[in-house]
Image (cartoon, helix red, strand yellow):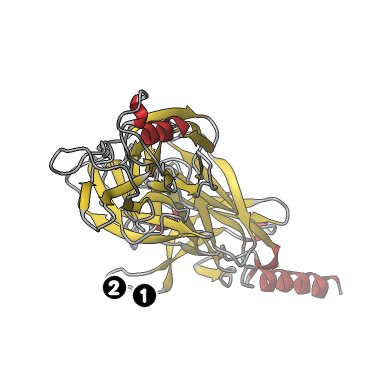
Amino acid sequence: MKIIKTVFLLLYSVSLFAQNPTAPVIDLVTVNNITKLPVVKWNYTDTQNIDGYIVKRLIYSHPGVADNTYNPVAIINNVYTFNFEDNSPDYGVALPYTRNEQYRLIAFSTDGNTINYSIMSELHKTIYAKVDFDYCNNSNIISWTKYVGWGSNLINYEIYSSQNNSSFIKIGQTNTNDTVFNHILSTSTNYKYFIRAIRADNEFSESNICEVTPVFPVLPKFILIDSLISTNNNINLYFNIDTNSEINKYTIYRETESSFDSIYSFSNISSPFITIEDKNVSESQQYQYFIGAINSCNVIIESSDTISNIVLSGKSPEINSFLNKLNWQTKNTIAKYDLYRATENNNYNFLVEVLDTFYTDDIFDIYQSNFDNHAGSGLFSYFVYATNINNYTIIKSNTEEIYQPEKIFLPNTFNPNSNIEENRIFKPKIAFVDKYLLVIYSNSGKIVFESNNIDNGWDGKSKNGEPAPEGTYVLYLQYTNSYGD
């Protein structure tokens, strides 16, 4: 019985050794970003029953080898070696910086001239990452292939970034189904990225490093609105733009009510000074403007400050009032205003500096001068002139006209021989009229005096120079008032 038992145990031992080894378990594959090579790590518990490992890589394209087949890139005879950096030139070098590399392992044992192989291990793939600069959204888009091999133990991906060769820092993470990350840029510099797949036990696998240097066009150093001039229901805008910019399209926007709309675009500017006329606007309406530099994505990338017109309005004087009341509105930030006035269609002259947005112009002295000496048209024209808070933009308001009603006193008697000089000449006391005509008739209907000059009065003489007889005469006065009536 002892002999039979010994033979049985020997046969069992030989039969057991002849069995194929169990497959290795790949722990992870990653990329060594110093050598830029893939690294495979694995574990094996039954090392006493094997003689080594075979590392197989998926071959994409190589002469004499079928595409997408696994071929050995390393035979490892040390059963206690559990990692391999793939620098093998067989079947072409590994390229984890241009694609994901895929690996499987086989364990083998030898029995004399017989080699026994395990089945291939589960597949593991490196992560291949790439980055594209999205100019229109001012961001880098990082995308990557999924890590394959951990199944449900893969819990997320972490994204790491470096700027100008600084240390890598974590900038975000995604779930296992999301393999795209949008990195909004703050500066134009060199960016590097890699992806780290995280396993449930905090083990990780890293992708290749990808990098990009965003190239932005040279932006204008300045876009200035030099002035805004309101005139005759038009608004003229004068701009000063940096012509050294690589942006060659600009659009002017105008706000009416609550939104800005483009009203004019121009491109390929050769002069820094641009003049735009916004026609057929209402002088009584408030507008805001700005000019935007438009990039190739049709997005405003730089813009000027906003500027608003000044809307000046006046109140018709009350009867027997010598006060012209003015007020104005603007959305600009203005420290002070300069008010200018013209009378009788003469040139404008500086009137007063105003800190508020209203002013009452007392024109009694002008009225008195007109009433005592000559007729005036009664038309008072004003505009407001301001410099906004940045001290470089000039704004001129619309012109506002205020019409003073005519003031007339008609004497009903005079004495050419009076001792008082003022009583020796007959003429109306009149102010704020235009196109004056005075005619005096005798009782018989003959014209004894006629003049369209308010300074000329009748001295009581007939046209032949002889004193006219004492009596009653008919006066005819014609004029146009400041309203044109």
Residue 392 seen anywhere in this rendered image of the structure: no
Residue 291 position in % (x across, y down): 36, 49
Q: Amino acid at mark 1?
A: Asp
Q: Is residue 6 left or right of residue 215?
A: right
Quadrant hosting residue 306: top left
Which image quarter is the C terminus in? bottom left
Q: How many marks?
A: 2
Between residues 15 and 383, which one lies in front from this camera angle? 383
Which residue corresponds to mark 1? 67
Residue reaching furthest right? Answer: 1
Labels 2 and 1 touching (C-beta < 8 A): no
Q: Is residue 298 visible?
A: yes
Is disc 2 surrounded by few (<14), some (14 to 19) or many (20+) residues within 10 Å?
Answer: few
* Residue 107 horizontal/vertical position (percent): 57, 63
Hey, what amino acid is under mark 2?
Gly
Q: Secondary structure at mark 2?
A: loop
Give x and y (percent) for residue 330: 50, 44
- In the rendered image, which quarter contains the N terminus? bottom right
Q: Does residue 88 lie above or below 464 as drawn?
A: below
Is 321 situated above or below 79? above
Local crowd size for mark 1, using a 10 Å CA cut-off: few (<14), some (14–19), many (≥20): few
Q: Which mark is residue 64?
A: 2
Where, by quadrant of the figure, is residue 392 drawn? top left
Which of these two is toward me, 95 or 185? 185
**Depth check: 77 or 216 in front?**
216
Q: Which mark is residue 379?
A: none
Residue at far top of view = 419
Q: Position of residue 404 (x, y in %)?
A: 44, 46
